[in-house]
Each structure stands twice: as structure tokens, then as C-alpha cells.
Image: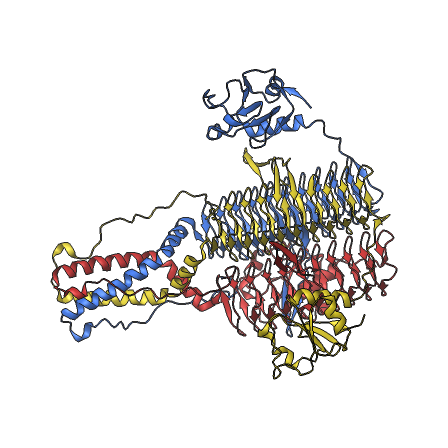
Chain colours: A red, B yellow, C blue
Amino acid sequence: MVATVEQLAALVSGRLVGDGKVSIHSARPVSEAGPGDITFIENDRYAKLLRTSPASAAIVGPHFRVKRPTVKDDLPVIEVDDPIAAFIMVRTHLSGEQKPRWTGVHPQAWVAPTATIGRDVAIYPFAYVGDQAVVADGSTIHPGAVIGDRCRIGRDCMIHPNAVLYADVTLEDRVEVHAGTVLGGDGFGYRQANGRHVKIPHTGKLEIGNDVEIGANCTIDRATFEATRIGEGTKIDNLVMIGHNNQIGRHNLLCGQVGIAGSCTTGDYVVMAGQAGIKDKTQIGDGAIVGAQAGVHRNIPSGQQVLGSPAIPVREQRRLFQMIARLPEMHRQLRELSAQIEAISAVVPLSPNHDGTVGDVDHDHDHDVDPTGF
Amino acid sequence: MVATVEQLAALVSGRLVGDGKVSIHSARPVSEAGPGDITFIENDRYAKLLRTSPASAAIVGPHFRVKRPTVKDDLPVIEVDDPIAAFIMVRTHLSGEQKPRWTGVHPQAWVAPTATIGRDVAIYPFAYVGDQAVVADGSTIHPGAVIGDRCRIGRDCMIHPNAVLYADVTLEDRVEVHAGTVLGGDGFGYRQANGRHVKIPHTGKLEIGNDVEIGANCTIDRATFEATRIGEGTKIDNLVMIGHNNQIGRHNLLCGQVGIAGSCTTGDYVVMAGQAGIKDKTQIGDGAIVGAQAGVHRNIPSGQQVLGSPAIPVREQRRLFQMIARLPEMHRQLRELSAQIEAISAVVPLSPNHDGTVGDVDHDHDHDVDPTGF
Amino acid sequence: MVATVEQLAALVSGRLVGDGKVSIHSARPVSEAGPGDITFIENDRYAKLLRTSPASAAIVGPHFRVKRPTVKDDLPVIEVDDPIAAFIMVRTHLSGEQKPRWTGVHPQAWVAPTATIGRDVAIYPFAYVGDQAVVADGSTIHPGAVIGDRCRIGRDCMIHPNAVLYADVTLEDRVEVHAGTVLGGDGFGYRQANGRHVKIPHTGKLEIGNDVEIGANCTIDRATFEATRIGEGTKIDNLVMIGHNNQIGRHNLLCGQVGIAGSCTTGDYVVMAGQAGIKDKTQIGDGAIVGAQAGVHRNIPSGQQVLGSPAIPVREQRRLFQMIARLPEMHRQLRELSAQIEAISAVVPLSPNHDGTVGDVDHDHDHDVDPTGF
């Protein structure tokens, strides 16, 4: 599709500076944009990228100064409050009509006769919908996805290919589950009897709130008795593991490969960076931030940032990292001090009771903590 | 289903204390239980939870003292040796008849004509069973699961949706493989030739013992030539990776996101906590415990507990963690001692040979270890 | 199949030492080989294993000395430059004719009418090929694999069961994608607006070069606008996560459970050991080696080896590990020195200004780094 800069400025309600008659064919980021393209810059720091860009127009922020030495004299720009959002809108517009979404139940899908399917639902080939499952209006079940018995899929949900929902999983509205993710599997719970691990049946559920998005190849387990819950608006990256009985708050961000053992709770707006691990039964307060690869083994108050394994507040951890980096220097210093003291002792007459031998035992105690944790 | 407390006490062979005529409709954990429910407490520590619970009955341990100030006078209790086990039994009983399990080969499944299918087998839509595969009596192959050529599935196995078994994987009896798990993939083995990584064909097998349970989205690779093996009764959590040629012992517990590189062996009753990583060719003795996020790069003797990355015995590691936490204090002390010595030196006449300069070089050696390990 | 040692020596162009008439039925590694088997040893270090092996022949390296006391007098050996490669060739030969590969589109697969399918393609039951997708000559799409709209699969590619390619993913030739892997999923990108995380649409692509192999249950995300790219010849182990916009170089080796956040670049021949994590926007030079469980948060120059979390050059990190191990000793030393200085101070008259109190504040600064990183 083709549009003039003027038309695009109108589309995004932006302020046009420069020639609005220039024709634009597509929208590309500045590193890729060529003649006929419109591009964008996030803020003035990147303004210099426009100087050498062959793009035909740009979307810029509200305080963008068209410094004539830095950008081409005749580059038309559209000033908006939010350049990325406007760029995405333009890009979608220029990429042309979206094919209308296919709906229906494909004959090569399998839907149990006892399942309830809403309006405008798409169920693709090789998707499986179990007994008494409900798929509400506007939802899409992609190829190979499996919806277990008695699951309830809300409105406008998107279940990507080969995702699996065990029985009794509930999704509210606009939940997106990416490919290969497994929801509602049994938790990892055993009891030992006669030298064997005997499985604790997991008869609980999994409940996922509105607007949750779950990345690819994640696993979220059902509860032992009650329900594992993921709060509204929480976003989960790929390969994240959330164990049984967890109560995850609203609007959390859980980055790639995070692992949360069982029976933890998190508040709202918690962030966990990549590969962080949370010990079972840990409570994490609102707005807490867990650093990458951190190993969290005790409760985190609201707003606290932690780092390291075992994790401690980030300021303290950074200080320890600095100290560790200085260890060779400290070690050297210690030896120098020893030599100096030896030299001094050689010339200072000391009473026999002050010969430097230290008799007191070490009072560090090992606390009797769970050996599998920290 | 409804039952009296008396009937439930008989069901679990427990001792009834209180009114046995009370009607119970369902079994719920104490945090959820309401009127008409039976609940349980694991031990006396949680007895106070019963005080405020509206539950109509409780299952308790053998030494439970019905302290009349703490629980309701008229709360009927069932005393048993194992409250959780009894609760699960009661819960199953009250949830009513289980629908009899569906069996058969669904017409939308694909089973190779050369495959052998036992009695009471269920093969769901979109399941695939390859050439010369064997599925023994009582096993279930869920939707979308793929059983490769020449695989042998023992009796009463459960293969959950979209799990994949490459060719030549053997499961003994009562093995449960959760959704999305991949068994028998090629190991990560290459040889460099002319600047390219050339694949080493993996013509070995994967053999999994009786009563093994494998969580969701795990991967266990086949061997290069012989067999990767998982011993009887071992339980594996989600997103665990077990590389080629590993020989995992019996009754191990491998928690979420554990990674075991190639050619390791573990004894019996080994436990690995979440996100632990094991270097290739490591040998881990019976009953060893590997802490969360530990990085194991050398053999662990039987019964040893290790922690940290690199992992060392847990007592030593905890001591080092304590020492690291004291580093700022040690750093301060060092500076104080320096200042004191400087002060002393100013008033003590030292011979020129004792000026504190230390001439000996540092004797720390870097061992010539595999650079990709620790 | 059966062959004489002489015939096998000819097959691998090796030098026969001993009786060439011995019949060989199969090829097994030395730990498993019995009578009638040929085995191999990689180098002289393992020569002693042949002494007790009941194998009927062995493949050995070029400088192998047939030390008559150590191996059986009459053991026929085949000397070659590369014993493993020769063994694999012999093993393949003895395992008999490979069944000719099945080709065709199975009637229980689903291929969009607008898709283009080349010659000698195999599309198995329950595989799904979307609109305008292209599958070039010689490629195999295994059961349950999903090829999204407009994907382009090159020649002789192998897509294993239940792997998922979202729309617009491009594979060049001879790419192997293992079971359960998800390619081209949306990146983890949100913007906050009114207290909610609003998804940034990912309209970019994923491009994978010639001869790339990707293990099981991995995830590689598409780019926000441009393309995530994996360079020719790179090999990726299981459960690896590669985020959006990454530009991975050629002939990298990424081991199990590695996680690479968004917008990183790696050079050629980079190696990352298991469970390593890379912060977003990091640049890693040619031939760099990242150790197991390392946490990389800053750029790594070409050829550098790093270790630890946060990661630093491996020599420095090993030195720090040694220093940390000595902390209890340093701590003890510090206390001894304190005691000695106290003793000295008791007999040395000091001026009031030199009492050892240190007035200067600590000048360590916390740098204002992204709190979710290191």
C-alpha cells in the first residue's frame, strides 16, 4: 500500500513538518530504511542516525529539534508524543489489509460433542478440545493445541500451536498462550514410603487472569488441592517454570527461564529477570525486582531489588561484588601487614602473653537450613 | 457424593472422635473448607487453624490433642497415622465415581500397521505410533503424542499430549511422561572438521525404568552408541535437560530446570534442587544432594551435600557465604590495621631489611581446566 | 549384516594388522562389545581396555602400538587416522540397509492449497503447512510439526515432531529442528501505559542459515521489526532460549539451557557452556567462550574466555574463586594480626594522632546500572 506523509500524519494525529506530498511505501526501522520508506527515532539521542539514512520520512518525538546540520534539509518528519506507537500504527497500515481471520471448526480438528464452542471461534486442524470444555467467543485454537476436559477458555484468547492445557484449566479473557507451553500439569510432589517416591495426586486447578500472556515452552503446574493462580495482566517470557500452588500477582514480568518452585506468592508489578530462581514458599512483595540469575531463598519486601545467589538487596550485593574483585589486593595487603608486624615484633619486646596466638574458637554457626536450598 | 464422618473414618481405618453422623459433601484444605466439608491438618502446629475453620470435620494425626480451647468442642475428628494420605483417599471417594477410562484407537490417530498394540490401550486423536512400535496393555497415548519407530512402551504407561519419543526409546512399566517432553533426541555431539561442526550420529538408545515420572517440556537425549538410562522410580520435574549417555540411578529426584550434561552417572536417591547444573562426565554418589543453582564440576561422594557455583560441600559453602558477607567489615579492618602499623612504624626503629616490602611472588596457579567448565 | 575385518578395513581405507578373515556381526563401543563385534579406541590411553575385551576386532589410531602384552595376540586391528569416524562408518554399514526414506504428503497431514511443496518431500500425519509456505526438495516435516504461513523451508531440512514455526520463518538448506522447538514466537516486549503492559507487535522475521541444528524444546523469537538471525553452521543444544532481534554468528555452539536476551550479537565460533545467560544488547566477539552458568552483562572481546556471574575473564575468575576459598584463613589471619598489633600497641608509646582510627569515608560507588541486570 502507498500513502503520502500527509496521510500518515493524519493517521497518527501527528504534526507534519516538511513536504507532505512525498510517497511512502513501507515503514522500516532506521537501520533498514531506504528510499520510499518512513522510519522513526525514539528520542533525540538517535537523531544523528537520520543524517545518513536514505529514508524518505521519519516519525519523531515531541521535543525533536530538526537540527538542520544533522538531518537532511528536506526530510519530512511527523512529530508525535509516542514515536514507536505511531510507527507501529503506520507499519500496520502500510502492510495492507489484513486477511480477515478464518473462523470455524476445521474438519480435521477434534471437538468433543460435550464441549461448548462460542461464536467467531477458530479451531484449526489437529486441535483437540476435550469433554465439557468451553471455548468462548472470538478465541483461536491453533493446530495441534490440546484443550483438556472441563477447561474454560475465555473470550478472544489465543492458544498457539501445540500448547497443552490439562483438564480443569481456566483462562479468563484475552489470554495468549504461546506454542508448546504446558498448563496445568501435575506438580512435583511426592512422599517417601518404603524407599519409593509415592505421587501426591494433584486434584487442584490452574486459573489464569485477563490479559495474561505466556511465552513458548513454559510450564505452569496445577495446585495440589486448591488453585495455582496467575494474576491479571502478568506477562511471562519463554521457558519459564511456575510450580504448583503459586499465587502470582497482577502485572508481573517474568523473564526467560525463570523458575518459581511451589507455594510462593508475588505481589503486583513484580519483575524477575532472566534465569532467576525462587525457592518454594517464598513471598515477594509488590514492585520487587529480582535480578538475573538471582537465587531467592527468603521473603522480599515490597519495592526491594535483589541480586545474587543467594540473593540480597542489590546495593549490598554490588558492594560484595566489588569487595570480591578486590580480594587479590586484600590478600596481598594481608601478607604485607604480616611481614611488617613480624619486623616490628623483632624489635619490640613483648610480654609472653601477647605473642599473637589467638585462642578463641570460631563462633560461626551453620544454621540448620534445608540442605537443598541456600 | 455424600458420606457421614463415620463412614469416612471406616474408609481410612481411622479412629473417630466426636459425632459420626455429620454429613460431609466434599474434602478441602483448611484454607478453603466450609460447612459440609472435611479438612485435614498435617500436624499439631497447624491445630490452631481448626479453631476458626467453618469445616464440619477434620482428619488429624495420631498424637493430635483435641485441646478444647483451640478447636470447636463439637468438631468431629478422624485420627489416622498419615493425615494427607487419608485426606486424599477421602477426597477421591467424595469426588464420586471416576468416569471409566476410555480405551481404543481413535480413528483420527495414526498407528503403523506394523505396530503392536496391547489390551486396554487408549490412543487418542492425532497420536502417532510408528513402525514396529509396541504399546503394552493398559497404556494411554494422549492427543498429539508421537511414538517413534521401534519404541517399546511398557504396561500402564501414560504419555501425555504432544510428548515425543524418537525411535528406539524403551519405557518399562508405569512410566508417566508429561506433555511436551522429548525423549531420545540426538545428543549434542560434534567434531570439528575444516572449520565446521560435523555431527556425530547418535545411534544409541534411551531406556527408562519402571515407575519413572518425567515432567513437562523436559528433554532426555539418546546415547551416542549405547544407552542413556533412567533408573527405576526416579522422578523428574519440568524443563529438566538430561544429555546423552547419562546413567541416572534409581529413586532420584531432579527438580525443575536442572541440567545434566553428557556421560554423567548418579547413584540411587540422589536429589538435585532447581536449576542445578552438572558438568559432563561427573559421577555423583548415592544419596548426594545438590543445592539449588549449584554448578557441579567434580565428582560427589555418596551422601555429600553440595552448594554453590562451583559447588563445594554445603557446610564449607555456607561458611564462605558468611565470609563474603563480612567482606566490607574485613576491608575496613584491613585499613585500620594498616593505619595502626603505620603509626607504630613511625615510632619504632626498624632495620632496613624489615621494611615490609614482600618479595615472594604469588604462588597461586591456575589449573589447566576445561575453559568451558569451572 | 556380516563382514570380514578385511572388508571393513577396505570400507574405511584402513591398514589391517592381523587376521582379516574374522567375521564381524556388529560394531559396539568397548564397554559393550562381545565376540563377533568390532570396537574402537580413540587413542593409546584406552589401549588397555582392549586387553580384557572379548571383542573380535578393533579400530585404532595411526600411532597405535600393538603392545603384545596389553592386547590379545591375535586381535585383528584396523589402523585409521580417525577411529571414531571409521567406527561410525562401520557401524552404519553393519546395521544393514537403511529402509528407503518414505516420501509424500500423508492424507492425514494438512497442507494449504497455496503452499508450494518440492520433490522428495515427506509430510507426515498431523503435520500442518500454512498458506503460501514453501517446503523445498528433500525436506521432511515430521508428525505434528506446524509450518506457519509464508515460511520458507530450504532443501533437505528436517523438522522433527511437534516443532512449531510461526509465520514468516525462513530456514536455508540442511537445517535440522528438533522436536518441540518453537521458532519465530513473539519477542518479550511491552510498554507500560496506565499501569498495564501493552504488547509491542512483533512484525519482524526469523532467518536461519545453512546447516544450523537446533535441539529439542528451544525457543527462538522473531524480531520486533527486522530479523532475528542464526548464522550458518551454528549448533544449538536443548532448551536454549534466544530472544528477539539477536544476531547469532556462524558456527557457534550454544549448550543446553543457555539463555540469550534480546538484541545481542555474537561473532563466529562463539561457544557458550550450559546454563549461561547473556544480558540484552551484549556483543560477543569471534571465538569467545562463555563458561557454564556464567552471567554475561558486558561486551566480550574476540577470543576472550569468561566465567562467573557476573562474568569476568576466566583467569581472573579462577583467581577470585581461589581467594574466596581462602576467606576463612584470611579472616583468621586478620584476627591474629589485630591481636598482635594490640599487643605491640600496649608496649609502644603512640602519639594521640596515630591511634588507628581511620577517618576517610568509603569511596565505593554504586554505579547506576539497570537493576534487573548485574
Q: Residue at x 45, y 50 (%)?
A: C306
Q: Is residue C310 visible?
A: yes
The quarter of the picture where the N terminus of chain A appears is: bottom right
User: Which sits in the foreground, A168 or B14?
Assistant: B14
Where residue A257 sits in the image (x, y, percent)?
A: 59, 57
In this rendering, would B137 be left or right of C31?
A: right
Q: Count numbered badges in the picture.
A: 0
Q: Position of residue C191 (x, y in %)?
A: 63, 67
Task: Locate residue B145, reporting x and y percent.
Answer: 75, 49
Q: Quadrant of residue B321?
A: bottom left
Residue A97 seen in the current view = no
Left or right: A179, with A275 as reference point: right
Which is more toward the observer, B294 or B77?
Answer: B77
Residue lying at 21% horizontally and 73% vertically, measured from the top left: C355
**Which residue is pictured at 82% across the width and 41% down the height?**
C106
- Front residue of B251/C145: it is B251
- Corner quadrant of residue B32: bottom right
Identify which residue, C169 or B318, lies in the foreground: B318
Image spot of residue C294 (x, y percent): 49, 53
